[in-house]
Amino acid sequence: MEQKTLIKLIVGSEAIFFLALLMAFVYFTYVPTLNPRVATTLDLTTTGLFTVLLLSSSFTFWRAEVSFRRGQTKSLRLWLSATVVLGVVFLIGQGIEYTGLLSKQLTVSKGTFTTSFFTLTGFHGLHVLIGIIILSIVLYLAFLGDLDDPDSALLPSVGIYWHFVDVVWAVVFVVVYVLPHFLTPRAS
Amino acid sequence: MITDVQLPEPKTPLPGATVNSDQGLLMWISSVDHKQIGIMYMIMTLFYLFVGGLLALLMRVQLMMPENTFLAPDSYNQLFTMHGTTMIFFVLTPAILGMAVYMVPLQIGANEMAFPRLNAFAFWISFFGGLLLYFSFLAGGAPDAGWFSYAPLNQTQYSASPGIDYYCIGLLLSGIGTVSTAANLAVTIITLRTPSMKYKYLPVFVWMVFINAFLILAAFPSLNAALAMLLIDRQLDGHFFNTDAGGSALLWQHLFWLFGHPEVYIVVLPPFGVLSEVFQVYSRKPIFGYPFVVGSGIAISLLAFGVWVHHMFATGMGNTVNSFFAVSSMLIGIPTGVKIFNWLGTMYGGSIRFTTGMLFATAFLVEFTIGGLSGISFAIVPIDWQLTDTYYVVAHLHYVFLGGSLFGLFAGFFYWFPKISGRMYSETLGKWFFWLFMIGFNMTFFMQHILGIIGMPRRVYTYPNLAGYSLLNLISSLGAFLMGGSMLIFLYLLYDAIKRGKRAGDNPWDGYTFEWLTSSPPALKNFTILPPVYSFRPVHDLNHPEIGDYQKSDEEKYGTKDTD
Ligand code: HEM
Ligand SMILES: [Cu+2]
């Protein structure tokens, strides 16, 4: 109870943090008109794929929680491992994307678009990384067999954080990757 | 019904350590006790109050006469920046947190915070944030772009020394601590109240801390994001605020004041709570209009997020925007005014004891109202255009920060000193301190209203010998020295009280709330048994059963009854 309330408050506070970064991005790329290069620079399909993977980690985590409540240790470990793997794959995807951009000389100091893009997605990546570290510890505890009290608030609290990280990404994905494609008139 | 509070306390202070951490410095460093952490916050606050005060005195020496050459312009810039940053982030903010962390568990009848280790973490990370900020003096120069570090002045091309980088990191660290403590306090108040303490029985101080926790959780992320962006600008050559490369100076102002205006309420709401306790106990009357005190606190916290643009009237946002924020800024004066009347109503007809704490509380009413009035005058856009960036702003902000927040904190400090230290302080010394401090304060800052109106800009290291400037500045500097001197009396008062003070009983003021039920100072474990709560004055009910609030109707209890 206490842990969950704490995590909810922290997550609410973090949401405002991301909102500030997002507003900066929106301000630099959408105002006064959309910067048309956004749609062409970023790769919607590849990132879309990794997005699906990250979002499905919310599903695997939910399954892990269900197994936890039912006391099914085996499937708990399985679903937790899947969650960690999906998180790591997402980070690898982000790494690949960053390398691609950097090789095109699109660095943080290139302009306001890259500055706000790397800051927004970078801070999200940092939160994924933190989530993976926490999840790994939880997984380790699960393998030790220490996660056997179905009333423990540990897993639900971690869950609140992890789902939050996924929701943030869903919003970032829509604003940074998807919307620009709809808003730029397709050049023939 | 007797509620037995059982809370496990650790048997060995540092389990597994081979060193003795029962006493001495190690006990403090390893402590997770909310009272010890509260005291450490207060010591840190006091330390930075002296440091920040010293910086201010240096500035006042420079400004004592026209065309003085005591300080060079660039040192002067560093001084006012460090002074403001210190006072806001390392004096007022930790002071309210420290008082809250010490008093909230006691007042709600708990033995600890909900997360004791998080509590310790938050204190220490703020502490090191402060050290880092000051390390900048050794690392090539302190920050020099003002406490709000406006863009593009905060960029490397204008401020090449690493000062502003230390500003970012130091404030980020302490910001993380502040947010953690806010969340911790909110959870503590939600979950650890003694079972019979309903929300309508929460002491007003606890209510204000509770509201404040949400204010912190919502306001600080905006600052933290801005600081992270600024650090990226400076360290990775980013372009958020670099106007030469398409960045936006206004973005910084929006993010900063979206935090900055709520911050001024963050440091004043807990003092509001303190005053509500102080006024009722020293007037021997329950607070007048409890629901209004709480309700106006909530109203203030909501409005606080809708007024930030009044710091940006001069940026040319157009009449529509300006009018909207002018109106919202004036609106926020209403709930604040409601509170003033609550306190006056509490004093009215009470049998008042003018202890040092009560003197500070009463002075607060006057000084804070002056600050509120100059605030309202700023909300009128043309007046703001005329007076912004002059000494009138300096006068306003000191009347609200010093005459408001700090006076409130002093009132609470003297009120709770016997509880925290177990000793009584000398009222004679207290009165000397109060009067000198109060006179010094008004001498220093009242003059600055006039200086601002006759056109003296703020943040300039010297001024020409124009009519009026020299005399007013001289008075202002002398007042500052008076305040500085009175702080020495304060130090002596502390020394004297701790060395020779009479032992304070558990409840020297006949206080109303649970902290007065335990020993002074409270033992490691605050309570073992608590009486049930029937009103917001549980200890008063216990000690004065014949007039206990539990016999009264709600209307009478909350002072909402029509008496004629
Ligand atoms: C009736 C309520 C208030 C109103 C309408 C008000 C209005 C204003 C306005 C319009 C300004 C901008 C002046 C300028 O730079 O041109 C200002 C500055 C300021 N106010 Fe208030 N204020 C109020 C209460 C407070 C309180 C309660 C505090 C703190 C506890 C506070 C702290 C400050 C500070 C620190 C500044 C200066 C910021 C700077 O460095 O420029 N104000 N206020
Ligand atoms: Cu303001």
Image (cartoon, coloured by chain):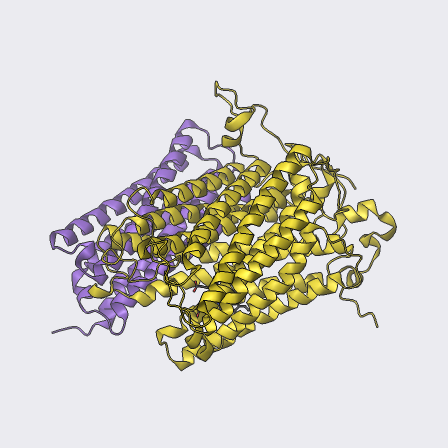
Instruction: Please tell me whether residue B269 is drawn above or below residue B114 in the rendered image.
Output: below
Q: Position of residue A65 (x, y in %)?
A: 44, 42
Residue B383 visible in the current orientation:
yes
Q: Position of residue A180 (x, y in %)?
A: 24, 67
Q: Position of residue A60 (x, y in %)?
A: 37, 45
Instruction: State which quadrant residue B426 falls in.
Output: top right
Q: Quadrant of the C terminus of chain B?
A: bottom right
Camera-side residue: B259 or B93? B93
Residue occupying the point 26% across, 44% down: A89
Residue B308 visible in the current orientation:
no
From this viewpoint, which residue is outermost toward the top?
B18
Residue occupying the point 23% across, 45% down: A92
Instruction: Please tell me whether residue B367 is drawn above or below residue B435 in the rendered image.
Output: below
Instruction: State which quadrant residue A106 falls in.
Output: bottom left
Instruction: Please indicate whether residue B95 sits to the left or right of residue B357 in the image.
Output: left
Instruction: Please tell me whether residue A158 is drawn above or below residue B71 in the rendered image.
Output: above
From this viewpoint, which residue is outermost toward the bottom?
B319
Chain letter for purple?
A
Camera-side residue: B499 or A125? B499
Chain letter for yellow?
B
Instruction: Please indicate whether residue A157 sits to the left or right of residue B562 in the image.
Output: left
Q: Quadrant of the N terminus of chain B?
A: top right
Q: Position of residue B188 (x, y in %)?
A: 58, 45
Instruction: Please indicate whether residue B466 sits to the left or right of residue B47 in the image.
Output: left
Residue occupying the point 28% across, 66% down: B248
Instruction: Please indicate whether residue B553 sits to the left or right of residue A112 in the image.
Output: right
From this viewpoint, which residue is outermost toward the right?
B546
Camera-side residue: A183 or B179? B179
